[in-house]
Image: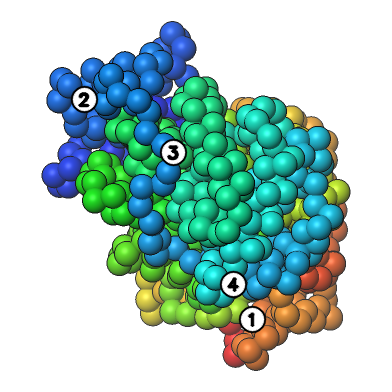
Amino acid sequence: MATLLRTPAGRRADALVERVADNPVLGLANGAEPGTIQRPQLAPEPQPEEPSRALALSDMIAVQAGPGEALIRLAYRIGVPGHALAAPFRRPPPLRVLATVESPNRGDRAAGTALRAGHFLIHGARLPIANLDFAPAARHAPGIERVLHSFSWLSDLAASAPRADCIVVAERITTQWLHANRAPGKGPAWEVEHAGLRLVAWLVHAPLVLAGHDKTLKSRLLAAIAETAAWLDKKASRTGAGFGQVAGWAGIVAAGLLLPHGKPRRLFGEAGLVKALGDMVGEDGGVLSRCPAAQLDAIRLLTDLLACYEAVEIAPPPALDVMRELLVPPLLALRHGDGALGSWQGQGAIPADRVAAVIEASGIRTRPLTNTANWGYHRIRAGDTMLQFDTAPPPRSRHARVGCASTLAFELSDGPARIIVNCGGAALAGGQVPARIGQGLRATAAFSTLVLDNANSTAVLLHGQLGKGVETVAVERRMVAGRGREATRIEAAHDGYAARFGLTHQRILTLSGDGTELAGEDILIPSAKNGKRGKIAFALRFHLGRGVEVQLSGDKRGASLLLPDGRLWQFRLRGDRAGAGAITLAAEDSLWVDGDGRPHATEQLVIEGLALRSGGQFSWLLRKTG
């Protein structure tokens, strides 16, 4: 494969990947050369835009509608009430939920059991229900706010026991929430993402919250459902592109399906949803936030929404099924040998059972996507060894959930054991991970890559946002001759340090065909013809998996890594060029956050020293010996 220039990913696109060209629903549009990646940028303003790699589903799979339905959609968009369009000259019918939804999605049984015991269990933290403040002025960590205000806990509760045993708990929490949020307004509860997910949860799990004996609650909740749907009608299109906007439109569509005279709202919502999905997802099916958890959430949301269509026996737009099929293969590509996901873009290692449950509920049976280069993650599997390599710029701020400066980091696993990892868990801060640590978990030093002068390759800002840094990544992948079998070699270079230090970081990873050797080279290349004078501190960090025991060699240039299952790997620092002084290898403390938000004390190997500003090269080898 020739070297590709990876530019800022994903303004609205005119292209789909070649692999879906034969799909009669999708077809193939014109666009940039397959294999490039661009960072998400949605700019509907007048200025011209460069070609992009997002899926413009709204252009290619526009929701089919005759002249009558198009007119209804237009009238609803400009403010004509839905009941007036669906049944002119009749009184609005009583508000009710029209059907019972049987979603194949299942929640976390442990979290549901905790709710029945009187507390929320969120990212490992126990929060007593009686003491929780749901009011707009309350201050909770973002991950906790998301669970509380999205009502995602309803699926956990439903998974924990028969419905009759859960209704009282659901009514109790819902009553507290409604009392604290009497009308649409400001605060975390009224972020479009939370409101959209909450509306879908209320409708999908209506038997839990509307089937009890509390008639007052039923009346108040139905009014809240109507108010939330009307609020989303106005706000969904005004939020930034990404999963939040998709969730808002999904709430509108669900309300259009399950509330009386909802056809105008449904038609309006379907058009907005398909457009939002196209703006959220790259051409190989990876979300432009580059976050595995967001990928998982999108699959789960579409599965719930398609279950709403099934409940009322209405055929969904083909784009929704196609999109769900596109989302699954990239997600599977980020699973390690233990079935859990890698720690990328702020997430912990989401457990295998949770990933498997969402995939099973989707009904999609497929293999991992072989080439996820457009999403920005290269995956190599050789024998029992799995390598994941981040070869793209971080997401743009408008798409980032909890953006991290992780370019050119990698993870490595041998069977079910993880050898090299990233710390992960920034998005889970506020539970068992202290909130003050969350910012540090987004830094380049929290990833297994090179750090110059203890600076981030991309600026890490507050509230999950990112600043200046990596804009382009050049990458090349090819097969090379190895010992007995061909090896896979990936070369990638980013410009995140070019403006500040005048250096480009290039990393070359070569995994042997049998998976027993990973050779690495980290090269600093002057970004201008004449390199700068002087020296600069560098550190190569290799965060080790949980349970890996480290023993440094006597010459301090190697280490033995004993995995929990008894397998043995050797790490060796090879020759370095243009080192401006002694290069040291040390074992230091580190931290790894699992998929449930629990932090674990681990170790890391750190190669430190001074490099010349005119460039340098540092080589290392990981070899399986037992």
Question: Which quadrant does the C terminus fall into?
Answer: bottom right
At label 4, counting other C-alpha atoms closer than 10 Å, the crowd grade (few under 14, some 14-19, many 20 or more) is: some
List x then y, in percent, for residue 497.
69, 36
Mark 3 highlights which residue?
Answer: 95
Q: From the image, state whether disc 1 or disc 2 is nearer to you.
A: 2
Mark 2 residue type: Glu
Q: From the image, state whether disc 1 or disc 4 is nearer to you.
A: 4
- Marks 2 and 4, the one that precedes in the sequence: 2
Please say if 45 is above or below 192.
above
Q: Which mark is residue 165?
A: 4
Dividing the picture into quadrants, the one containing residue 583 is bottom right
Mark 1 to mark 2: distance in Å?
A: 64 Å
Q: Which mark is residue 569?
A: 1
- Marks 3 and 2, the one that precedes in the sequence: 2
Q: Secondary structure at mark 1?
A: strand
Q: From the image, state whether disc 2 or disc 4 is nearer to you.
A: 4
